Amino acid sequence: MLKFDFTNAISDNVANGVSIEDVKKISRRLHDFLESFRQGMPGFAKILDEQEDERRKIVDFAEKNQHFKNFVVVGIGGSALGVQAIKGALLHSEWNSLSDDERNGYPRLFVMDNVDPEHIAELLDIIEPRQTLFNVVSKSGSTAETMANYLIVRGLLEAHGLDPKKHLVFTTDPNEGTLRKISIDEDIPAFSIPPNVGGRFSVLTPVGLLSSAMVGIDIAEMIDGAKEELQSFLSQDDALKNPVLFNAALHYLYSKMGKNISVMMPYSNALYTMADWYRQLWAESLGKEKDLTGEIVNAGQTPIKSLGTIDQHSQVQLYMEGPNDKIITFLRVEEFRRKTVIPKLHEDKKTLSYLGGKEMKKLINAEQEATALALMEKGRPSLTISFEKIDAREVGIFFFYYELTVMATGFLYGINPFDQPGVELGKTNTYALMEREGFEEQKEHVENLRKNLKYLVM
Ligand code: PA5
Protein backbone atom coordinates (compact mmCIF):
# COMPACT_ATOMS: atom_id res chain seq x y z
CA MET A 1 0.00 0.00 0.00
CA LEU A 2 1.09 3.56 -0.67
CA LYS A 3 0.39 6.19 2.01
CA PHE A 4 -0.48 9.77 1.11
CA ASP A 5 0.17 12.58 3.56
CA PHE A 6 -1.26 15.95 2.50
CA THR A 7 -0.77 17.65 5.88
CA ASN A 8 2.03 19.97 4.78
CA ALA A 9 0.02 21.22 1.81
CA ILE A 10 -2.93 22.52 3.82
CA SER A 11 -3.34 26.06 5.16
CA ASP A 12 -3.61 24.77 8.78
CA ASN A 13 0.13 24.11 8.44
CA VAL A 14 1.43 26.13 5.55
CA ALA A 15 0.92 29.89 5.44
CA ASN A 16 -1.26 31.15 2.57
CA GLY A 17 -1.90 27.56 1.53
CA VAL A 18 -4.95 25.86 0.09
CA SER A 19 -7.51 25.26 2.82
CA ILE A 20 -9.79 22.31 3.39
CA GLU A 21 -12.64 24.72 2.62
CA ASP A 22 -11.06 25.45 -0.80
CA VAL A 23 -11.01 21.72 -1.57
CA LYS A 24 -14.60 21.35 -0.40
CA LYS A 25 -15.65 24.21 -2.69
CA ILE A 26 -14.66 22.15 -5.74
CA SER A 27 -15.88 18.83 -4.32
CA ARG A 28 -18.86 18.91 -6.69
CA ARG A 29 -16.54 18.93 -9.70
CA LEU A 30 -14.38 16.23 -8.17
CA HIS A 31 -17.47 14.15 -7.69
CA ASP A 32 -18.50 14.81 -11.30
CA PHE A 33 -15.13 13.49 -12.38
CA LEU A 34 -15.54 10.33 -10.32
CA GLU A 35 -19.03 9.80 -11.72
CA SER A 36 -17.96 10.36 -15.32
CA PHE A 37 -15.11 7.88 -14.76
CA ARG A 38 -17.56 5.31 -13.39
CA GLN A 39 -19.81 5.83 -16.43
CA GLY A 40 -17.06 5.27 -18.99
CA MET A 41 -13.57 4.18 -18.08
CA PRO A 42 -10.64 5.37 -20.21
CA GLY A 43 -8.52 2.93 -22.21
CA PHE A 44 -5.69 2.84 -19.65
CA ALA A 45 -8.13 1.45 -17.06
CA LYS A 46 -9.97 -0.93 -19.38
CA ILE A 47 -6.75 -2.74 -20.27
CA LEU A 48 -6.49 -4.11 -16.74
CA ASP A 49 -9.24 -6.58 -17.63
CA GLU A 50 -9.09 -6.55 -21.39
CA GLN A 51 -5.44 -7.44 -21.97
CA GLU A 52 -5.26 -10.68 -20.01
CA ASP A 53 -4.64 -12.74 -23.14
CA GLU A 54 -1.93 -10.39 -24.30
CA ARG A 55 -0.26 -10.67 -20.86
CA ARG A 56 -0.31 -14.47 -21.05
CA LYS A 57 1.37 -14.24 -24.46
CA ILE A 58 3.99 -11.91 -23.01
CA VAL A 59 4.92 -14.35 -20.24
CA ASP A 60 5.04 -17.20 -22.72
CA PHE A 61 7.20 -15.21 -25.16
CA ALA A 62 9.54 -14.12 -22.34
CA GLU A 63 10.03 -17.69 -21.14
CA LYS A 64 10.98 -18.80 -24.65
CA ASN A 65 13.42 -15.93 -25.20
CA GLN A 66 15.18 -15.53 -21.91
CA HIS A 67 18.29 -17.21 -23.34
CA PHE A 68 19.21 -13.89 -24.98
CA LYS A 69 21.96 -12.06 -23.14
CA ASN A 70 20.61 -8.61 -24.06
CA PHE A 71 17.13 -7.19 -24.43
CA VAL A 72 17.16 -3.75 -26.05
CA VAL A 73 14.05 -1.59 -26.07
CA VAL A 74 14.02 0.81 -29.03
CA GLY A 75 11.46 3.55 -28.38
CA ILE A 76 11.07 7.09 -27.09
CA GLY A 77 8.77 9.15 -24.81
CA GLY A 78 5.84 7.07 -23.62
CA SER A 79 7.37 4.10 -25.41
CA ALA A 80 10.56 4.22 -23.29
CA LEU A 81 10.08 6.12 -20.02
CA GLY A 82 7.90 3.45 -18.39
CA VAL A 83 10.55 0.83 -19.18
CA GLN A 84 13.24 3.05 -17.64
CA ALA A 85 11.05 3.65 -14.58
CA ILE A 86 10.45 -0.07 -13.99
CA LYS A 87 14.10 -0.89 -14.58
CA GLY A 88 15.19 1.78 -12.10
CA ALA A 89 12.67 0.78 -9.46
CA LEU A 90 12.75 -3.00 -9.63
CA LEU A 91 16.15 -4.11 -10.88
CA HIS A 92 19.54 -3.96 -9.21
CA SER A 93 20.97 -0.50 -9.99
CA GLU A 94 23.96 -2.16 -11.71
CA TRP A 95 21.87 -4.89 -13.38
CA ASN A 96 23.72 -4.77 -16.69
CA SER A 97 27.08 -5.15 -14.94
CA LEU A 98 26.05 -8.23 -12.95
CA SER A 99 27.17 -11.66 -14.12
CA ASP A 100 24.69 -14.01 -15.84
CA ASP A 101 24.42 -15.99 -12.58
CA GLU A 102 23.80 -12.87 -10.52
CA ARG A 103 21.00 -11.94 -12.95
CA ASN A 104 19.59 -15.48 -12.55
CA GLY A 105 20.10 -15.96 -16.27
CA TYR A 106 17.80 -13.10 -17.25
CA PRO A 107 19.03 -10.75 -20.00
CA ARG A 108 20.65 -7.37 -19.55
CA LEU A 109 18.17 -4.57 -20.29
CA PHE A 110 18.99 -1.50 -22.37
CA VAL A 111 16.90 1.35 -23.73
CA MET A 112 17.82 2.92 -27.06
CA ASP A 113 15.79 6.10 -27.06
CA ASN A 114 17.71 9.17 -28.13
CA VAL A 115 19.19 9.62 -31.59
CA ASP A 116 22.42 10.99 -30.21
CA PRO A 117 24.99 9.30 -32.51
CA GLU A 118 27.43 8.72 -29.62
CA HIS A 119 24.77 7.17 -27.37
CA ILE A 120 23.73 4.77 -30.13
CA ALA A 121 27.25 3.85 -31.21
CA GLU A 122 28.40 3.28 -27.62
CA LEU A 123 25.42 1.08 -26.82
CA LEU A 124 26.09 -1.00 -29.91
CA ASP A 125 29.77 -1.24 -28.87
CA ILE A 126 28.83 -3.36 -25.86
CA ILE A 127 26.20 -5.70 -27.23
CA GLU A 128 26.77 -8.71 -29.41
CA PRO A 129 23.91 -8.77 -32.01
CA ARG A 130 23.83 -12.59 -32.05
CA GLN A 131 22.95 -12.56 -28.35
CA THR A 132 20.47 -9.70 -28.56
CA LEU A 133 16.72 -9.37 -28.94
CA PHE A 134 15.51 -5.91 -29.99
CA ASN A 135 12.04 -4.74 -28.98
CA VAL A 136 10.98 -1.88 -31.25
CA VAL A 137 8.19 0.02 -29.48
CA SER A 138 6.14 2.64 -31.29
CA LYS A 139 2.42 3.12 -31.11
CA SER A 140 2.29 5.16 -34.32
CA GLY A 141 5.00 3.11 -35.98
CA SER A 142 6.37 6.29 -37.52
CA THR A 143 8.22 8.37 -34.87
CA ALA A 144 11.43 9.51 -36.59
CA GLU A 145 13.79 8.66 -33.71
CA THR A 146 12.45 5.16 -33.19
CA MET A 147 12.29 4.43 -36.90
CA ALA A 148 15.89 5.64 -37.38
CA ASN A 149 17.05 3.43 -34.51
CA TYR A 150 15.05 0.52 -35.92
CA LEU A 151 16.85 0.94 -39.26
CA ILE A 152 20.22 0.99 -37.49
CA VAL A 153 19.36 -2.20 -35.60
CA ARG A 154 17.95 -3.89 -38.67
CA GLY A 155 21.06 -2.93 -40.64
CA LEU A 156 23.21 -4.44 -37.89
CA LEU A 157 21.26 -7.71 -37.92
CA GLU A 158 21.53 -7.92 -41.70
CA ALA A 159 25.26 -7.17 -41.60
CA HIS A 160 25.67 -10.14 -39.23
CA GLY A 161 23.46 -12.40 -41.38
CA LEU A 162 20.93 -12.78 -38.55
CA ASP A 163 17.27 -13.68 -39.02
CA PRO A 164 15.11 -10.61 -38.15
CA LYS A 165 12.25 -12.90 -37.05
CA LYS A 166 14.45 -14.25 -34.25
CA HIS A 167 16.05 -10.97 -33.16
CA LEU A 168 13.18 -8.50 -33.45
CA VAL A 169 9.88 -8.15 -31.65
CA PHE A 170 7.58 -5.18 -32.21
CA THR A 171 5.16 -3.48 -29.82
CA THR A 172 2.76 -1.33 -31.82
CA ASP A 173 -0.81 -0.60 -32.86
CA PRO A 174 -2.78 -3.81 -33.54
CA ASN A 175 -3.75 -2.76 -37.07
CA GLU A 176 -2.15 0.49 -38.19
CA GLY A 177 1.32 1.78 -38.99
CA THR A 178 4.52 0.69 -40.69
CA LEU A 179 5.74 -1.59 -37.89
CA ARG A 180 2.50 -3.60 -37.95
CA LYS A 181 2.77 -3.89 -41.72
CA ILE A 182 6.37 -5.12 -41.54
CA SER A 183 5.44 -7.60 -38.83
CA ILE A 184 2.67 -9.05 -41.01
CA ASP A 185 4.74 -9.06 -44.22
CA GLU A 186 7.76 -10.67 -42.60
CA ASP A 187 6.19 -12.69 -39.81
CA ILE A 188 8.02 -10.77 -37.10
CA PRO A 189 6.43 -11.32 -33.66
CA ALA A 190 4.44 -8.31 -32.43
CA PHE A 191 2.47 -7.26 -29.36
CA SER A 192 -0.36 -4.74 -29.37
CA ILE A 193 -0.83 -1.34 -27.79
CA PRO A 194 -4.60 -0.81 -27.69
CA PRO A 195 -5.59 2.15 -29.91
CA ASN A 196 -7.43 3.79 -26.98
CA VAL A 197 -4.30 3.95 -24.77
CA GLY A 198 -1.99 6.91 -25.38
CA GLY A 199 1.81 6.57 -25.24
CA ARG A 200 2.34 8.04 -21.77
CA PHE A 201 -0.52 5.96 -20.35
CA SER A 202 0.78 2.72 -21.87
CA VAL A 203 3.26 1.48 -19.27
CA LEU A 204 0.93 -1.31 -18.13
CA THR A 205 0.44 -2.59 -21.69
CA PRO A 206 3.11 -4.64 -23.53
CA VAL A 207 5.07 -1.36 -23.78
CA GLY A 208 6.25 -1.76 -20.19
CA LEU A 209 5.31 -5.36 -19.52
CA LEU A 210 7.32 -7.21 -22.17
CA SER A 211 10.72 -5.96 -21.01
CA SER A 212 9.62 -6.52 -17.40
CA ALA A 213 8.72 -10.15 -18.06
CA MET A 214 11.98 -10.64 -19.96
CA VAL A 215 14.00 -9.73 -16.85
CA GLY A 216 11.90 -11.79 -14.45
CA ILE A 217 9.63 -9.09 -12.98
CA ASP A 218 6.26 -10.42 -11.87
CA ILE A 219 3.94 -8.53 -14.21
CA ALA A 220 0.83 -10.08 -12.66
CA GLU A 221 1.79 -8.41 -9.35
CA MET A 222 2.16 -5.07 -11.10
CA ILE A 223 -1.28 -5.41 -12.69
CA ASP A 224 -2.79 -6.54 -9.37
CA GLY A 225 -1.40 -3.37 -7.79
CA ALA A 226 -3.04 -1.25 -10.50
CA LYS A 227 -6.36 -3.09 -10.06
CA GLU A 228 -6.18 -2.53 -6.31
CA GLU A 229 -5.63 1.19 -6.93
CA LEU A 230 -8.57 1.33 -9.34
CA GLN A 231 -10.88 -0.26 -6.77
CA SER A 232 -9.72 2.03 -4.01
CA PHE A 233 -10.29 5.08 -6.25
CA LEU A 234 -13.76 3.96 -7.32
CA SER A 235 -14.89 3.15 -3.80
CA GLN A 236 -14.33 6.54 -2.14
CA ASP A 237 -16.65 9.48 -2.89
CA ASP A 238 -15.26 11.79 -0.25
CA ALA A 239 -12.49 13.82 -1.91
CA LEU A 240 -10.68 14.30 1.38
CA LYS A 241 -10.39 10.53 1.78
CA ASN A 242 -9.67 9.81 -1.87
CA PRO A 243 -5.94 10.42 -2.53
CA VAL A 244 -6.45 10.82 -6.29
CA LEU A 245 -9.11 13.51 -5.91
CA PHE A 246 -7.34 15.22 -3.02
CA ASN A 247 -4.03 15.43 -4.89
CA ALA A 248 -5.67 16.59 -8.13
CA ALA A 249 -7.54 19.30 -6.20
CA LEU A 250 -4.37 20.51 -4.48
CA HIS A 251 -2.33 20.69 -7.67
CA TYR A 252 -5.15 22.41 -9.52
CA LEU A 253 -5.83 24.95 -6.75
CA TYR A 254 -2.15 25.68 -6.18
CA SER A 255 -1.58 26.20 -9.90
CA LYS A 256 -4.46 28.70 -9.90
CA MET A 257 -2.59 30.49 -7.08
CA GLY A 258 0.51 30.80 -9.29
CA LYS A 259 2.40 27.68 -8.26
CA ASN A 260 3.37 26.79 -11.77
CA ILE A 261 5.98 24.21 -10.87
CA SER A 262 5.40 20.70 -9.58
CA VAL A 263 8.51 19.07 -8.15
CA MET A 264 8.73 15.34 -7.58
CA MET A 265 11.52 14.52 -5.17
CA PRO A 266 12.10 10.85 -4.34
CA TYR A 267 14.33 10.03 -1.36
CA SER A 268 15.35 6.83 -3.07
CA ASN A 269 17.66 6.34 -6.05
CA ALA A 270 15.43 3.54 -7.28
CA LEU A 271 12.47 5.90 -7.60
CA TYR A 272 14.33 8.59 -9.52
CA THR A 273 13.34 7.20 -12.93
CA MET A 274 9.73 7.11 -11.71
CA ALA A 275 10.01 10.89 -11.42
CA ASP A 276 11.11 10.97 -15.08
CA TRP A 277 8.03 9.01 -16.04
CA TYR A 278 5.88 11.38 -13.96
CA ARG A 279 7.44 14.41 -15.65
CA GLN A 280 6.27 13.27 -19.06
CA LEU A 281 2.83 12.30 -17.82
CA TRP A 282 2.30 15.64 -16.06
CA ALA A 283 3.81 17.82 -18.79
CA GLU A 284 2.28 16.26 -21.89
CA SER A 285 -1.12 15.62 -20.37
CA LEU A 286 -1.72 18.98 -18.71
CA GLY A 287 0.34 21.41 -20.77
CA LYS A 288 -2.38 22.57 -23.15
CA GLU A 289 -3.06 25.75 -25.08
CA LYS A 290 -6.84 25.38 -25.27
CA ASP A 291 -9.54 23.95 -23.05
CA LEU A 292 -12.32 21.70 -24.30
CA THR A 293 -14.41 24.70 -25.38
CA GLY A 294 -11.58 26.01 -27.53
CA GLU A 295 -10.71 28.91 -25.22
CA ILE A 296 -6.99 29.72 -24.83
CA VAL A 297 -5.98 28.70 -21.30
CA ASN A 298 -2.29 27.73 -21.53
CA ALA A 299 -2.83 25.24 -18.72
CA GLY A 300 -0.29 23.11 -16.92
CA GLN A 301 2.54 23.08 -14.40
CA THR A 302 6.20 22.53 -15.20
CA PRO A 303 7.22 19.21 -13.64
CA ILE A 304 10.71 19.07 -12.18
CA LYS A 305 12.53 16.08 -10.76
CA SER A 306 14.87 16.23 -7.82
CA LEU A 307 16.65 13.52 -5.85
CA GLY A 308 16.85 13.43 -2.07
CA THR A 309 19.15 13.84 -0.33
CA ILE A 310 21.48 14.89 -3.16
CA ASP A 311 19.42 17.87 -4.27
CA GLN A 312 19.21 19.18 -0.73
CA HIS A 313 22.73 20.29 -1.55
CA SER A 314 21.75 21.75 -4.91
CA GLN A 315 18.06 22.66 -5.35
CA VAL A 316 16.51 22.98 -1.91
CA GLN A 317 17.96 26.43 -1.19
CA LEU A 318 15.90 27.69 -4.14
CA TYR A 319 12.80 25.77 -3.04
CA MET A 320 13.10 27.30 0.46
CA GLU A 321 13.89 30.91 -0.37
CA GLY A 322 13.43 31.47 -4.10
CA PRO A 323 10.09 32.22 -5.80
CA ASN A 324 7.22 30.57 -3.92
CA ASP A 325 5.93 29.01 -7.13
CA LYS A 326 6.18 25.29 -6.41
CA ILE A 327 4.32 22.40 -4.89
CA ILE A 328 6.61 19.54 -3.97
CA THR A 329 5.79 15.84 -3.88
CA PHE A 330 8.20 13.80 -1.78
CA LEU A 331 8.47 10.05 -2.33
CA ARG A 332 9.87 8.01 0.53
CA VAL A 333 10.37 4.34 1.34
CA GLU A 334 9.60 2.79 4.72
CA GLU A 335 11.40 -0.53 4.22
CA PHE A 336 14.40 -0.48 1.89
CA ARG A 337 15.40 -3.79 0.28
CA ARG A 338 18.94 -3.53 1.63
CA LYS A 339 19.92 -2.73 5.18
CA THR A 340 23.01 -0.60 5.79
CA VAL A 341 24.13 0.17 9.31
CA ILE A 342 26.60 2.97 9.94
CA PRO A 343 29.57 1.62 11.93
CA LYS A 344 30.21 3.02 15.42
CA LEU A 345 33.60 4.64 15.03
CA HIS A 346 35.22 7.81 16.39
CA GLU A 347 32.85 7.76 19.35
CA ASP A 348 34.72 10.63 20.97
CA LYS A 349 33.84 12.98 18.09
CA LYS A 350 30.39 14.55 18.41
CA THR A 351 30.14 15.36 14.69
CA LEU A 352 30.34 11.62 13.92
CA SER A 353 29.20 9.71 17.02
CA TYR A 354 25.47 10.49 16.66
CA LEU A 355 25.50 8.62 13.32
CA GLY A 356 27.22 5.43 14.52
CA GLY A 357 25.05 2.34 15.02
CA LYS A 358 22.06 3.85 13.17
CA GLU A 359 20.54 2.51 9.99
CA MET A 360 21.06 4.56 6.81
CA LYS A 361 17.29 4.28 6.30
CA LYS A 362 16.79 6.38 9.43
CA LEU A 363 19.10 9.08 8.09
CA ILE A 364 17.53 9.36 4.62
CA ASN A 365 13.99 9.43 6.01
CA ALA A 366 14.93 11.94 8.72
CA GLU A 367 16.37 14.19 5.99
CA GLN A 368 13.14 13.94 4.01
CA GLU A 369 10.99 14.81 7.00
CA ALA A 370 13.30 17.61 8.07
CA THR A 371 13.15 19.15 4.59
CA ALA A 372 9.34 18.90 4.41
CA LEU A 373 8.99 20.56 7.82
CA ALA A 374 11.43 23.33 6.99
CA LEU A 375 9.58 24.03 3.72
CA MET A 376 6.30 24.11 5.62
CA GLU A 377 7.70 26.70 8.02
CA LYS A 378 8.72 28.79 5.03
CA GLY A 379 5.19 28.63 3.61
CA ARG A 380 6.12 26.15 0.86
CA PRO A 381 3.53 23.38 0.35
CA SER A 382 4.48 19.73 -0.03
CA LEU A 383 2.94 16.30 0.19
CA THR A 384 4.53 12.95 0.89
CA ILE A 385 3.84 9.61 -0.74
CA SER A 386 5.31 6.65 1.15
CA PHE A 387 6.10 3.28 -0.36
CA GLU A 388 5.94 0.54 2.26
CA LYS A 389 8.60 -1.19 0.14
CA ILE A 390 9.46 -0.96 -3.53
CA ASP A 391 8.06 -4.03 -5.25
CA ALA A 392 6.10 -4.83 -8.43
CA ARG A 393 2.74 -4.35 -6.68
CA GLU A 394 3.55 -0.90 -5.27
CA VAL A 395 5.06 0.17 -8.60
CA GLY A 396 1.79 -0.87 -10.30
CA ILE A 397 -0.18 1.12 -7.72
CA PHE A 398 2.02 4.18 -8.28
CA PHE A 399 1.68 4.14 -12.07
CA PHE A 400 -2.06 3.75 -11.93
CA TYR A 401 -2.45 6.30 -9.14
CA TYR A 402 -0.72 8.96 -11.24
CA GLU A 403 -2.61 8.07 -14.41
CA LEU A 404 -5.82 8.66 -12.47
CA THR A 405 -4.51 11.81 -10.80
CA VAL A 406 -3.39 13.44 -14.03
CA MET A 407 -6.75 12.65 -15.61
CA ALA A 408 -8.61 14.15 -12.63
CA THR A 409 -6.40 17.27 -12.76
CA GLY A 410 -7.07 17.60 -16.48
CA PHE A 411 -10.79 17.40 -15.76
CA LEU A 412 -10.49 20.30 -13.31
CA TYR A 413 -8.58 22.37 -15.89
CA GLY A 414 -11.23 21.47 -18.47
CA ILE A 415 -8.60 20.28 -20.94
CA ASN A 416 -8.02 17.01 -22.82
CA PRO A 417 -5.24 15.14 -20.99
CA PHE A 418 -4.96 12.50 -23.71
CA ASP A 419 -3.75 14.45 -26.74
CA GLN A 420 -0.38 16.10 -27.47
CA PRO A 421 -0.81 18.57 -30.35
CA GLY A 422 2.43 20.33 -29.37
CA VAL A 423 4.47 17.14 -29.73
CA GLU A 424 2.83 16.36 -33.05
CA LEU A 425 3.83 19.80 -34.42
CA GLY A 426 7.48 19.16 -33.58
CA LYS A 427 7.26 15.71 -35.21
CA THR A 428 5.81 17.23 -38.39
CA ASN A 429 8.56 19.87 -38.56
CA THR A 430 11.17 17.10 -38.21
CA TYR A 431 9.62 15.17 -41.10
CA ALA A 432 9.75 18.38 -43.15
CA LEU A 433 13.39 19.10 -42.30
CA MET A 434 14.33 15.50 -43.03
CA GLU A 435 12.57 15.77 -46.41
CA ARG A 436 9.95 13.09 -45.85
CA GLU A 437 7.64 12.64 -48.83
CA GLY A 438 4.25 14.29 -48.32
CA PHE A 439 5.64 17.07 -46.09
CA GLU A 440 6.75 19.47 -48.88
CA GLU A 441 4.33 22.23 -47.83
CA GLN A 442 5.47 22.04 -44.22
CA LYS A 443 9.06 22.18 -45.43
CA GLU A 444 8.39 25.48 -47.16
CA HIS A 445 6.75 26.79 -43.99
CA VAL A 446 9.71 25.73 -41.83
CA GLU A 447 12.18 27.26 -44.31
CA ASN A 448 10.29 30.56 -44.01
CA LEU A 449 10.48 30.39 -40.21
CA ARG A 450 14.21 29.79 -40.47
CA LYS A 451 14.66 33.06 -42.37
CA ASN A 452 13.68 34.93 -39.23
CA LEU A 453 16.72 33.64 -37.31
CA LYS A 454 18.69 36.87 -37.52
CA TYR A 455 20.73 36.91 -34.33
CA LEU A 456 23.20 34.10 -34.86
CA VAL A 457 26.20 35.20 -32.84
CA MET A 458 29.61 33.52 -33.26
O1 PA5 B 1 2.79 10.15 -24.84
C1 PA5 B 1 2.93 10.17 -26.05
O2 PA5 B 1 1.97 9.95 -26.83
C2 PA5 B 1 4.27 10.43 -26.69
O3 PA5 B 1 5.25 10.76 -25.76
C3 PA5 B 1 4.73 9.18 -27.44
O4 PA5 B 1 4.83 8.10 -26.55
C4 PA5 B 1 6.06 9.39 -28.14
O5 PA5 B 1 6.00 10.51 -28.98
C5 PA5 B 1 6.42 8.16 -28.98
O6 PA5 B 1 5.40 7.86 -29.89
P1 PA5 B 1 5.27 6.46 -30.59
O7 PA5 B 1 5.05 5.42 -29.55
O8 PA5 B 1 4.13 6.60 -31.53
O9 PA5 B 1 6.57 6.22 -31.32
Image: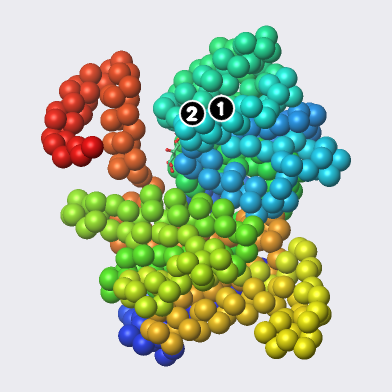
Res 136 visible: no
Disc sitting over residue 198 in the figure: none
- Which quarter of the picture shows residue 401? bottom right
- The type of residue carrying mark 2 is Pro
Q: Which residue is mark 1?
A: 121
Is 304 left or right of 350, judged from the image as shown? Answer: left
Q: Is residue 382 above or below residue 87?
A: below
In front here: 240 or 210?
A: 210
- Decide: marks 2, 1 in contact (CB < 8 A)? yes
Q: Quadrant of the C terminus?
A: top left
- Which quarter of the picture shows residue 5? bottom right
Q: Which residue is mark 2?
A: 117
Residue 238 image position (x, y, % from top left) = 48, 77
| Mark 2 crowdedness (10 Å alpha carbons): few <14, some 14-19, many ≥20 | few
- Where ligand 1 lies, by image quadrant? top left
In front here: 64 or 105?
A: 105
Residue 433 image position (x, y, % from top left) = 29, 24
In front here: 276 or 139?
A: 276
Q: How many marks?
A: 2
Residue 215 image position (x, y, % from top left) = 73, 41
Give SS at disc 1. Answer: helix
Give SS at disc 2. Answer: helix
Q: Quadrant of the N terminus?
A: bottom right
